[in-house]
Amino acid sequence: MPLVKGRQTTISFKDLNGHLYVVIVSMDQLLMAVKDVLLVEEYEMLTPFNSCYRHRLVVDAGAHVGLYSLKMMEKAEKIIALEPEPRNYKLLLENIYRNHAYAKIIPLRVALWKKRGLVKLFKGSDTSMHSLFGTGEMLKVPAIEFSQIIDRYGDIDLLKMDIEGAEYQVLLSMKDNELLRVKKIVAELHPLRDYKVAITKIIVKLKRLGFNVSVVKPPISQPLSYTVHRITGSRLVNPRWLKPLAVFFYAIGKLMKARSSVMMLYALRLDHNERTTS
């Protein structure tokens, strides 16, 4: 019996130190989730953001089923994983349990938003695209402000956001003193109405506070320069085909303009000196 409604499969991967992680992934997001986090590594395109760096506290907003949180676990002391959608959250809990990650990963079934309270979460076309913006089928989920995370857990080394359009209002609503308690921010920027204006405002705000900011397009494919993943799958998935299929479907999606306007934002506080560990 599957843990949640819909088809799932199990994949496993190893980090550079040989630690094995076993993850349940929804079939509708198998290719894209594995591509984004493990193959293309779009949250780690700039060196200071890769998983080889030590982080005291990581916030994973839009954690989905926990692939990124697990990938960062080896070099992070604590990870706060935010996922508001109930079925994704159930898989997130199971993946934390399977990988004995409960001492490091703190799961919260909440959305990150500009104010606390209940918000409408609209159902997406797949399990990774539920959004606070949309029409049609929806459910109400609890939301928290960024200030609540800071107040409870303290300064944040790395804030990762993939929150399907809510990133603009979250970043613009954050107070200066809150942003100054974050060392690094990486966010997927989704093409909503007037999003280019919002991106400009965010860049101006972050630079004023001393962040070095880059906005780049995620690649279709790139060499894995610092992480080697040995990915295996269940009997439904031949891991040899994961990368070519992921690249193929991503390219098709790009041609159809499904993700043609998605950008990645990287912000690094200039007064923060990173240290790598071997």
Image (cartoon, rainbow, N blue to C red):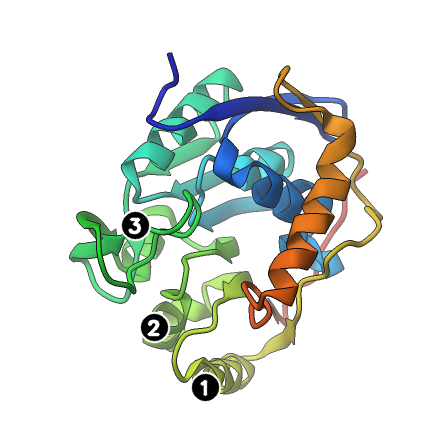
Q: Secondary structure at mark 2?
A: helix
**Residue 71: which quarter of the image?**
top right
Toward the viewer: 245 or 15? Answer: 245
Q: Position of residue 255 (x, y in %)?
A: 65, 66
For the point 50% across and 56% down, which residue is it? 159
Q: Secondary structure at mark 1?
A: helix
Circle 2: is it few (<14), some (14-19), or many (20+) Cα within 10 Å? some
Identity, as a three-letter code, of the amino acid under mark 1: Lys
From what the image shows, is residue 131 above or below residue 79? below
Toward the viewer: 170 or 140? Answer: 140
Q: How far apart in space, not on screen, are marks 2 and 1 (Cα)?
A: 11 Å
The residue indicated by pointer 2 is 169
Identity, as a three-letter code, of the amino acid under mark 2: Gln
Position of residue 65 in the picture relative to residue 17 (left or right): left
Circle 1 or circle 3, nearest the eye: 3
Specify the quadrant that holds the C terminus.
Answer: top right
From what the image shows, is residue 18 above or below residue 258? above
The residue indicated by pointer 1 is 201
Identity, as a three-letter code, of the amino acid under mark 3: Lys
